[in-house]
Image (spheres, grey):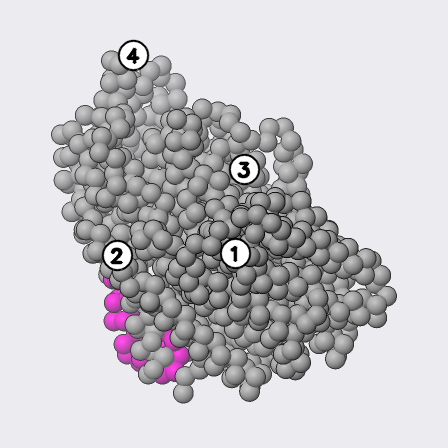
């Protein structure tokens, strides 16, 4: 049963990643691309981590996966902020 | 006879040749440095592929150690090349002024 | 015929890494090329993990993709002119070189197939496994790097030293970055201690699991890079005299331990029985510091005392 | 009891660390370090003469699992030359750099380059050789760029990129060898090698990598600008030793390790490239307008002579005739090392005193710098191959071996090369002895002029008269046949 839940979470997570990547490629401007990327990746990675944690069935591994998710979210949010700030500044100076 | 080792070893060879071509032909220094790194990655991939012993066997650690050494040498050379390029441009700008 | 699922994955990874390598070199826009190269490095790390080389996956992610990427990007920042396509080069006359490298790849592939398919050999794996209990560590890669082939690592630290001395000899450091805004500053406040702790962990764990001096040193250097990006010109490094001592620490530790072995047992770098583990940790600790300072100085890019007084206004650290 | 094998590597490295940490004392540290290294090299040669060859298993591990250092007569002789040249150039460099900051940056890198050379000469492991090649390449590049000008930096960058390509090709060859045979130790590998695709391809890759570094025509194009624009002591080391170390490696691979794999046609290819290098390099040296550029092109030519030996040595069966030819090859390499380093040091003195090194404007040099002009003339004697220099004996032996094998084209190459060499040397001397005040004598201490003189005396007198013991030493069995 755990395997089924874990695997389906992993697959849903991968689906979010896929959607984020398609958004990155297809959306018209930088800010909306960033939006698609960060939202989809954060959620996708969270589901992936959760699914893998359930599959592993070990709370220590689950904790590590959770920490990884937190770290990536923090770094991702900061990076997106920096990129967006840079883009806005460029538009201003134009 | 197609094995994971062979796939990645041949990919490594292809990357080596690809990088070699770029290192000789790329118009910009930065491009050449990139190409040397790609070429180096090809040799590393060749070594790691040679070390691989299938999903069940333990890989040969010796090529792994060689590649680790190689990665560090590559980053040193890259840093030096970029610093030299920057210095050269400064000197050329001074000469232009 | 059913294709093994692993082989399918391998084929996809191989094609992807080739495509990324090709695209990064073929792109006329160098900024795009560098970005693709960083992705190429991350994919390499994935492939190392797939080929059961976790030590390399760590090193590639931090050094190959991370620090090399930072160096390349900062080179672009220094010289925006580089992004423009063209420049002096051999346009059009290189087709025969292309053919030559293609032929070379063909010959190498043939030789390799010959070796792998008809003459597989086990390399040094058995000899290393047999000697591992005497090596003082249980991670075989660390055993090779710091015991069986410690002399390679010793000379490799000398290579690092040459590179950093060369960079310092060439000229002044790159201009510092503007002070970070609240978001980047906040991030670096969180990340810095984490990076330092992780580096210490990797150094310690290298004896029996993936990790070791190079990964740890590179992580420390990454912390310094982060500090410099956040506006701190000296990247948190100590003064010039202390830096010199830190630069030589790794090689000096090797020499000291090596000479003790030479006098004690007659062979350079031979560790006395029972002491191998501690001596390796000693060398690795010194090497970690040397590697960190070396890579950080490589990112700073020159002598600090001569940084131009008026920092060039560049748009690389917003906020 | 310890053996001398690690010391020629360790002593310059230790000196480099001290020179880095105590920059004020760097010069004294360098001279002391080189003196100690010289003692270690003499000790090593003495032990090799006594025992035939030496092995040091690093870390106490069986070579194969671990790395071994090895020395035979060839390695020990080149090592001694390298230390002597290193010592003389160190002495010279002490007075050469006047800028304090530059001096402090120079010494550690200089000592690291010497470390790299010695590590390469003594290494017995293919991957370790790659590391030493990178160490040598990077330190040579940095030192070549230390001249400071844009021209020097541009040449050094090209040197760096080509050197890195060469090292990678070498490493690719090493990877193929490991994939096929699973061994990196050269002594353990030698009996396993067979003529087959992997070995051929690996040898080709490694050789191309080394040929770039040893600047064999047509892969020589990076050398003249890099060597001509570097500071004089650095040029001396680059031309005399760095190129020679790469050549040594090639010699090891072709005549020792890969002997069963090498074909006569491949050896002829190298020989013909060498012949082209002799003609092209000598011709360019004759046309060069600057003294240091002339010296650099002369290096291209002199490297060519060394490659003329390859097809002859491959064609000769094992025995006294081959040993004699091999001895002549080593003698030529040693002579060139001493003569060319002396030439570059003397050229540096001339350049300092005259403020330039344009050959046509060097009138008056003989009057103002008699010792240095004498050194230039003696270096010329050795480069042309006149008696009593080692070059004379070596070229004589090369000629008689070619006659013995009825390989007539070599006589033509030797004749043309020597005539051209005579032409460029006499052109230089005629200008130097001519009227004018090109080189005005300012302050010259003996330390400036003596090192060059001593080096060219080694090339002409010592090697010319001491050739017989050298031949005896070289006919001892090679290192690879001795197991630890």
Residue labelled with disc 3: B22
Question: In the picture provided, is D478 more to the left or to the right than A46?
Answer: right
Residue labelled with disc 1: D368
Placement of A68 over or under D233, stated as above or below: above
Camera-side residue of C250 and C161:
C161
Element under label 3?
A: helix
- Position of residue C117 measured from the top left corner of the image (x, y, whole percent): 62, 56
Mark pair 2, 3: CA separation: 36 Å
Element under label 2?
A: helix
Placement of A38 over or under D143, stated as above or below: above
Magenta residues? C265-289
Residue D304 lies in quadrant: bottom right
Tag on residue D377? none
- Position of residue C128 measured from the top left corner of the image (x, y, whole percent): 43, 70
- Position of residue A8 measured from the top left corner of the image (x, y, whole percent): 31, 35
**Contact (Cβ within 8 Å) of mark 4 with mark 1:** no
Element under label 4?
A: loop
Question: In the picture provided, is C250 more to the left or to the right than D96?
Answer: left
Chain of the residue under the numbered disc 1 shown in the image? D
Tag on residue A94? 4
Badge 2: residue crowd in 10 Å (few <14, some 14–19, many ≥20): some
Element under label 1?
A: helix
Mark pair 4, 3: CA separation: 35 Å
Disc nearest the viewer among 2 and 3 = 2
Disc nearest the viewer among 4 and 2 = 2
Query: Which image quadrant: the N terminus of chain D?
Result: bottom left
Residue labelled with disc 2: C244
Mark pair 2, 1: CA separation: 43 Å
Chain of the residue under the numbered disc 2 shown in the image? C
Camera-side residue of C41 and A39:
C41
Residue in view at x 76 percent, y 76 percent: D321
**Contact (Cβ within 8 Å) of mark 4 with mark 2:** no
């Amino acid at each position: 049963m755990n395997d089924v839940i874990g695997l389906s979470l992993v697959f849903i997570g991968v689906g979010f990643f896929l959607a984020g990547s398609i958004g990155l490629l297809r959306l018209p401007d930088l800010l909306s691309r960033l939006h698609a990327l960060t939202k989809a990746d954060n959620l996708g990675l969270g589901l992936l981590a959760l699914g893998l944690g359930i599959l592993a069935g070990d709370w220590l591994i689950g904790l590590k996966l959770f920490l990884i998710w937190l770290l990536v979210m923090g770094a991702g949010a900061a990076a997106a902020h920096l990129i967006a700030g840079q883009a806005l500044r460029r538009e201003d100076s134009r | 006879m197609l094995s994971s080792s062979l796939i990645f070893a041949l990919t490594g060879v292809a990357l080596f040749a690809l990088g070699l071509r770029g290192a000789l032909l790329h118009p910009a220094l930065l491009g050449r440095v990139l190409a040397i790194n790609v070429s180096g990655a090809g040799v590393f991939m060749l070594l790691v592929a040679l070390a691989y012993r299938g999903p069940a066997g333990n890989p040969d650690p010796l090529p792994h150690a060689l590649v680790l050494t190689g990665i560090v040498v590559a980053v040193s050379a890259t840093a030096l090349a970029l610093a030299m390029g920057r210095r050269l441009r400064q000197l050329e700008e001074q000469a232009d002024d | 015929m059913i294709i093994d699922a692993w082989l399918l994955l391998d084929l996809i990874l191989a094609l992807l890494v080739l495509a990324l390598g090709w695209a990064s070199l073929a792109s006329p826009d160098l900024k795009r090329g560098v970005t693709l190269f960083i992705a190429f490095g991350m994919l390499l790390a994935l492939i190392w993990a797939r080929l059961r080389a976790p030590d390399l996956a760590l090193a590639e992610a931090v050094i190959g993709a991370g620090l090399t990427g930072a160096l390349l990007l900062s080179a672009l920042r220094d010289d925006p002119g580089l992004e423009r396509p063209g420049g002096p080069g051999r346009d059009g006359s290189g087709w025969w070189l292309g053919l030559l490298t293609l032929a070379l790849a063909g010959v190498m592939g043939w030789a390799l197939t010959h070796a792998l398919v008809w003459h597989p050999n086990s390399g040094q794996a058995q000899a290393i496994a047999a000697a591992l209990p005497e090596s003082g560590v249980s991670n075989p890669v660390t055993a090779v790097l710091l015991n069986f082939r410690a002399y390679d690592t010793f000379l490799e630290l000398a290579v690092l030293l040459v590179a950093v001395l060369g960079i310092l000899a060439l000229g002044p450091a790159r201009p510092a970055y503007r002070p970070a805004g609240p978001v980047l500053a906040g991030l670096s406040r969180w990340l810095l201690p984490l990076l330092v702790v992780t580096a210490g962990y990797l150094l310690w764990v290298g004896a029996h699991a993936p990790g070791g001096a190079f990964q740890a040193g590179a992580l420390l250097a990454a912390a310094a890079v982060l500090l410099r990006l956040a506006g701190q010109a000296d990247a948190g490094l100590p003064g010039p005299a202390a830096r010199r001592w830190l630069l030589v620490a790794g090689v000096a530790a090797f020499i000291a331990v090596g000479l003790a072995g030479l006098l004690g047992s007659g062979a350079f770098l031979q560790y006395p029985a029972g002491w191998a583990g501690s001596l390796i940790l000693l060398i690795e600790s010194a090497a970690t510091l040397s590697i960190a300072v070396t890579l950080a100085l490589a990112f700073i890019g020159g002598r600090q005392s001569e940084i131009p007084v008026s920092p060039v206004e560049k748009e690389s650290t917003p906020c | 009891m310890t053996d001398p094998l690690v010391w020629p590597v360790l002593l310059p490295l230790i000196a480099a660390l001290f020179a880095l940490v105590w920059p004020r004392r760097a010069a004294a540290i360098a001279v002391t370090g080189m003196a100690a290294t010289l003692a270690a090299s003499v000790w090593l040669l003495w032990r090799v003469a006594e025992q035939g060859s030496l092995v040091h298993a690093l870390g106490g591990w069986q070579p194969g699992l671990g790395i071994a250092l090895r020395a035979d007569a060839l390695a020990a002789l080149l090592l001694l030359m390298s230390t002597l040249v290193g010592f003389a150039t160190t002495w010279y460099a002490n007075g050469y750099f006047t800028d304090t900051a530059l001096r402090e940056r120079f010494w550690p890198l200089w000592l690291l380059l010497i470390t790299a050379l010695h590590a390469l000469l003594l290494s017995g492991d293919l991957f370790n050789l790659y590391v030493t090649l990178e160490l040598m390449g990077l330190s040579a590049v940095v030192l070549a760029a230390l001249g400071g000008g844009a021209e020097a930096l541009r040449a050094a960058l090209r040197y760096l990129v080509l050197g890195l390509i060469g090292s990678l090709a070498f490493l690719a060859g090493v990877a193929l060898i490991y994939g096929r045979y699973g061994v990196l130790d050269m002594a353990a590998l030698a009996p396993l090698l067979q003529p087959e695709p992997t070995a051929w391809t690996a040898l080709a890759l490694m050789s191309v990598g080394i040929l770039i570094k040893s600047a064999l025509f047509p892969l020589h194009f990076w050398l003249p600008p890099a060597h001509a624009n570097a500071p004089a002591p650095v040029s001396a080391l680059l031309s005399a030793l760095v190129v020679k170390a790469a050549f040594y490696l090639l010699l090891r691979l072709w005549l020792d390790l890969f002997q069963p794999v090498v074909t006569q046609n491949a050896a002829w290819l190298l020989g013909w490239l060498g012949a082209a290098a002799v003609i092209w390099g000598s011709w360019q040296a004759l046309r060069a307008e600057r003294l240091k550029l002339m010296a650099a092109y002369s290096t291209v030519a002199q490297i060519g002579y060394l490659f003329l030996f390859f097809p002859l040595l491959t064609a000769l069966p094992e025995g006294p005739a081959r040993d004699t030819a091999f001895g002549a090859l080593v003698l030529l390499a040693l002579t060139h090392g001493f003569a060319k380093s002396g030439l570059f040091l003397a050229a540096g003195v001339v350049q300092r005193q005259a403020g330039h090194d344009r050959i046509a404007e060097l009138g008056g040099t003989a009057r103002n710098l008699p010792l240095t002009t004498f050194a230039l003339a003696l270096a010329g004697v050795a480069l042309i191959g006149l008696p009593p220099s080692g070059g004379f004996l070596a070229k004589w032996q090369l000629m008689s071996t070619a006659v013995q094998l009825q390989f007539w084209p070599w006589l033509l190459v030797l004749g043309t090369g020597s005539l051209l060499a005579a032409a460029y040397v006499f052109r230089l001397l005629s200008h130097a002895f001519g009227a004018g005040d090109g080189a005005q004598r300012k302050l010259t201490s003996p330390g400036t002029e003596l090192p060059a003189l001593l080096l060219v005396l080694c090339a002409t007198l010592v090697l010319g008269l001491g050739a017989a013991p050298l031949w005896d030493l070289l006919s001892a069995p090679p290192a690879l046949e001795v197991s630890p």
